[in-house]
Image (cartoon, rainbow, N blue to C red):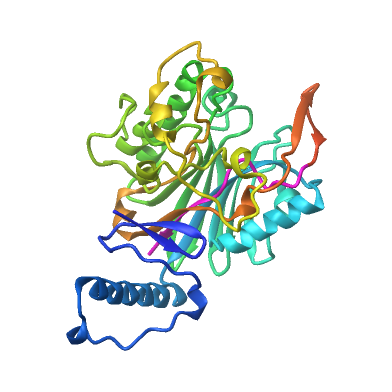
């Protein structure tokens, strides 16, 4: 695996290409290549890198790939501040994804407030739910259907309240893709104490795929409130409700986790806002040293005081997994690291008589940043 600088995102490329940096994709001009005049291996690798980039841009420009992202937007409603609205619009524009899964959405109007008209939205509004999930697709992709899975109250332990698993059927290039948008139970109340609820949700997702979506093009994405080495994610990766937690010892056999290798570089998706809210730079550092190790350290331990004991609080919660028949079509994947996604004063909320109330409407976009992948 190699990590490649791509504009302001960081990309994980599945092929064995060397490192290169591109500061402005829009001014790239392919050179005339002559392998016979290469003076050393470094020069040869630079030429190969340029050729790869040219091929990548040509493929993307011809519509042969789509960019898929997931984004938890902290308690998004239609009454956000104008500064936050502007920041979120910029994040969406620079993310430039064809498909975006959302979590923590109050209603359709909240999304329409930040999305361009080129996106169509699949959301099932529940009057009493302030953390809905949704999926937006950009034309020419088409939404054919959307429905809740496990909407019955008996599944509320796994899928809290009306925060149900959302299935959206999308058409791209005459083929159908089934997106399952998930927002798992948070770790509030204790990580070990709530593990079983996230694990139950994963087992139910596996059951649904095996029973209803076998051999289909499936993308499971969202905020799982666990990192790729936790048991809930291993259940999804192996299709086994009894899968243990811990660092993987074998390749994914049921769903391929396109985000898992981010752990090798301690990339996160939650917690950057608290570290970089005052940054004046255009981008922020994705690597938070010790993030993966810290998560592994506390796995299964009860009576942990999160604020006192957990030293590294940034973590990779947001992930994208695909069915095995799509694994060979996975291209680049990355974490969005433009500072507009994390800069600014945070918002504050409280619940009063079951109603969400903002006590401060800040400018920051969210406490999460988007995670994305390219499907060829």
Residue closer to the observer: 198 or 41? 41
Query: The C terminus appears in which quarter of the rendering?
Result: bottom left
Q: Residue 141: image x %, image y %?
A: 53, 65
Residue 297 sits above or below residue 150 on the image: above
Residue closer to the observer: 50 or 324? 50
Residue 140 sits above or below residue 128 on the image: below
Figure quadrant of residue 353: top right
Q: Which residues are magenta?
A: 362-376
Please give the name of the residue rendered at 53% of the width and 62% of the height, measured from the top-left corner: 98
Residue extending farthest front: 39
Residue extending farthest top: 303
Q: Is residue 76 left or right of residue 373?
A: right
Q: Residue 195: image x %, image y %?
A: 46, 21
Figure quadrant of residue 188: top right
Please give the name of the residue rendered at 55% of the width and 51% of the height, measured from the top-left corner: 284
In the rendered image, is residue 235 in sight?
yes
Residue closer to the observer: 109 or 144? 109
In the rendered image, is residue 207 in sight?
no
Please give the name of the residue rendered at 49% of the width and 65% of the height, measured from the top-left corner: 7
Q: Is 204 included in the stretch rendered in magenta?
A: no
Residue 121 sits above or below residue 253 on the image: below
Q: Residue 193: image x %, image y %?
A: 50, 15
Q: Residue 91: image x %, image y %?
A: 63, 57
Please give the name of the residue rendered at 35% of the width and 48% of the height, measured from the top-left corner: 323
Residue extending farthest left: 36
């Amino acid at each position: 695996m190699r990590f490649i600088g791509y504009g302001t995102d960081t990309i994980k490329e599945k092929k064995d290409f060397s490192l290169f940096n591109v500061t402005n994709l829009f001014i790239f001009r392919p050179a005339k290549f002559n392998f016979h005049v290469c003076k050393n291996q470094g020069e040869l690798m630079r030429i190969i890198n340029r050729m790869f980039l040219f091929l990548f841009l040509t493929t993307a420009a011809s519509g042969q790939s789509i960019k898929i992202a997931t984004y938890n937007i902290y308690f998004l409603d239609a009454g956000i501040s104008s500064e936050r609205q502007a920041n979120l619009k910029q994040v969406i524009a620079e993310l430039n994804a064809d498909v975006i899964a959302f979590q923590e959405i109050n209603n359709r109007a909240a999304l329409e407030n930040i999305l361009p008209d080129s996106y169509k939205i699949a959301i099932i509004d529940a009057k009493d739910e302030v953390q809905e999930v949704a999926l937006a697709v950009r034309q020419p992709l088409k939404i054919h259907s959307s429905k809740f899975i496990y909407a019955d109250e008996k599944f509320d332990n796994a899928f809290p309240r009306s925060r149900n698993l959302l299935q959206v059927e999308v058409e791209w290039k005459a083929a159908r893709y089934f997106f399952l948008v998930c927002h798992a139970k948070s770790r509030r109340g204790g990580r070990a104490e709530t593990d079983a609820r996230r694990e139950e949700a994963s087992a139910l997702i596996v059951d649904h795929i095996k029973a209803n979506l076998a051999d289909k093009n499936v993308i499971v994405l969202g905020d799982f409130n666990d990192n790729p080495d936790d048991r809930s994610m291993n259940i999804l990766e192996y299709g086994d409700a009894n899968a243990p937690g811990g660092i993987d010892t074998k390749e994914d056999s049921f769903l391929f986790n396109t985000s898992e290798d981010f752990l090798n570089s301690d990339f996160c998706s939650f917690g950057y806002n608290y570290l970089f809210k005052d940054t004046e730079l255009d981008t922020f550092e994705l690597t938070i040293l010790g993030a993966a190790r810290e998560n592994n350290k506390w796995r299964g331990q009860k009576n942990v005081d999160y604020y006192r004991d957990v030293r590294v609080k940034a973590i990779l919660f947001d992930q994208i997994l695909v069915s095995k028949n799509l694994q060979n079509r996975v291209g680049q994947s990355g974490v969005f690291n433009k500072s507009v996604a994390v800069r600014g004063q945070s918002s504050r909320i409280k619940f009063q008589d079951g109603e969400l109330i903002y006590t401060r409407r800040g400018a920051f976009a969210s406490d999460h940043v988007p995670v994305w992948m390219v499907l060829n």
